[in-house]
Amino acid sequence: MSAQSLLLKEAAGPGQDLNAQALRADARRESLRLLALLAPSLFLVCAIIIVPIGWLFWLSLFDETGAFSAANYARFFEQASYIKTFITTFKVAFIVTGACVLLGYPLAYMLSQLPRRAASICLIFVILPFWTSVLVRTYAWLVILQRKGLINSWLIDLGVISQPLSLANNFSGVVIGMTHILLPFLVLPLYASMKTIDTDCLRAGMNLGAGPAATFRQIFFPLSLPGLASGVVIVFVLCLGFFVTPALMGGGKVVMWAMRMEQTTSLYSNWGAGAALGVVLLVVTLALLGLFQWLLGARATGVWSSR
Amino acid sequence: MNRTTSFRTLAIAGLFASVAAPAVAADTITVASWGGTYQEAETKAFFKPTADALGITIKEDTTNGLDDVRLQVTGNAVKWDITELGADECARGSKEGLFEKLDYGVIDKSGINPKLVHDDWVGISYTSVVLIYRTDVFGDKGPKTWADFWNVEKFPGRRALSSSQATETLSVAALASGLPIDKVYPVDIDGALKSVDKIRGHVDAWWTSGAQAMQLVKDGEVDMASIWNGRAGTLKKAGAPVSFSFDQGVLTADCMVIPKGAKNKEAAMKALAMFVSPQLQANLPLYVDNGPVNEKAFETGKIPAERIKDINSAPENVKKQVLQDAEFWRDNLVEATEKFNNLIQQ
């Protein structure tokens, strides 16, 4: 734009209008051509994302007789269980994300500092469970945590406790199971971003007299934030839609939104009832992501908006 | 060269087959059920003998229930000629007009509880909800009635009930409040919910599938639970230290329907008539713990006498149990389930 105005200024005289017109036409042609190049991918996005979500939203506006109504949304306020389930979902998501950060950050940091060979061997241990079915891992946790499971029988045999701890079929079981399953989603992007941090920056800090703690706090940590932010967002969003682990580890006492969707869809002879739950979750998730981006600013969120 | 020839032969054979297909299709029906060991038992008890007797081919599929049927019927893409459902689903689907009318000139309904014989659906088998307890915890002095199960002082221990089958848990709760088995229906929903409210703080797990109920009891995660009799029987046969009886059981029926717009209605009607006949019904308990819906099956002499006492729908056992009223739940399911969820999803 600035180059254009510069040109226009220089070309003062009778040819100016003509020149400006030609330039504008050129710019229009260029943007049309770019749009044409984009068209296939725009079409794809529209066909596989916008249309189905729009359809979901449309379905949620009809009751079981096919009449236009807000009944599917009114239900959230009439039946106390919906709000409770919704709060539970976000409570679980926040706690699991927090636990993943507490465990994942030191792990990713260690991996990024190890020599390359050792790091790749350790990474295999992060990725290996990632390839195992979620169902299998959840059942494995059940075997470990339940009343007569590994942990309780060991602790009782060692005489540490006399009564078994309740670790499974409750809130803590859900958090443990989900944290384990979601940890790689935090570690992998975080590790990738830590690997790209220029060690010269750290050396420069040391040269200027900062101790290891200050170097980490003032240089390494801020530079690792984009990776951390993207890991946190991935984990948080995956938490919101989790089904298998809370269904099996929660003992029916921890009901999350996805489980509620399944119940509602089978209870009402109407797709709209379940669709409304999907719409609410989508809207709230998008709002939260917006809030997150606003809070952390463009610096930390550079991963999903490359500004 | 050889390969091309054989391809050509195949293609020609295929052409003939497709021309001949309509004649064959008239004698092929597709039946959908729940899969697993139950459907394997149905194949041996019902499907194979019927196919042999009528000279037709019975293809099998599996269903997730009423949603699948609704999707097929409203989408004009009916794949099945007969499908199995839970009785309350049959009652709901019937109200929605999803099924073809049954011809009781072809299907002999004698021996089937009239509550399970309707214009467009008919019962096929029974499952019971029973009380199971671990004998390594209670010996033989475990909870025998639902009132015992609710009595947390006399029977301390961990408990599991079903949350996915709200209607069954509400029937159980009504029994626990002291109602005799013939006074449970029509269920006083608010009264039953009050009863659930009393026990919910002592329930350590709410199960949502039969497999989960079985695992909870098998691993000793709970000491007593409500459970389907088929799962309870499997546990006992596998040697788990458990005990259960049909006292105060809740009988739930499964039913079969012909989805509206089924391609092969006539053959389906004949096959359904075979499925509910006493002779084939008597086969079912030989393979699985789900009891026959036709009580005349017990008069065929096919079922060994010592097996009869373990079958939930044997006349002696039926007397001890409450039959889930499908039409009551058709009208009250949504309201009752939402209230139940409000209570237990804290």
Image (tube, helix red, strand yellow):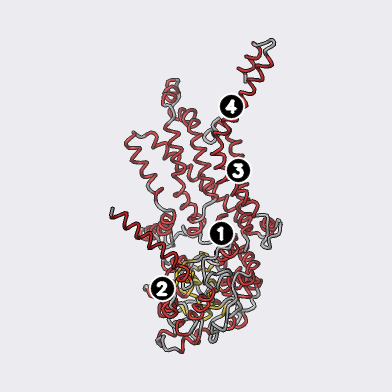
Quick check: do tags 4 and 1 share a chain? yes
Q: Are marks 4 and 3 on the same chain?
A: yes
Three-letter code, disc 2: Thr
Reply above or below: B318 against B134: below
Element type at mark 2: helix
Say if residue B163 shows up in the picture. no
Kindly indicate the quadrant of the structure image that contains residue B338: bottom right
Mark 4–mark 1 distance (CA, rounded to whole Å): 49 Å
**Residue occupying the point 52% across, 49% down:** A239
Q: Secondary structure at mark 4?
A: helix
Q: Is B333 placed left or right of B144 in the picture?
A: right
Of the residues shown, which amino acid type is indicated by label 1?
Answer: Glu
Identify the residue under disc 4.
A30
In what element is the residue under mark 1? Answer: helix
Amino acid type, mark 3: Leu
Q: Is residue B341 left or right of residue A174?
A: right
- The x, y position of residue B263, in whole percent, is 53, 69
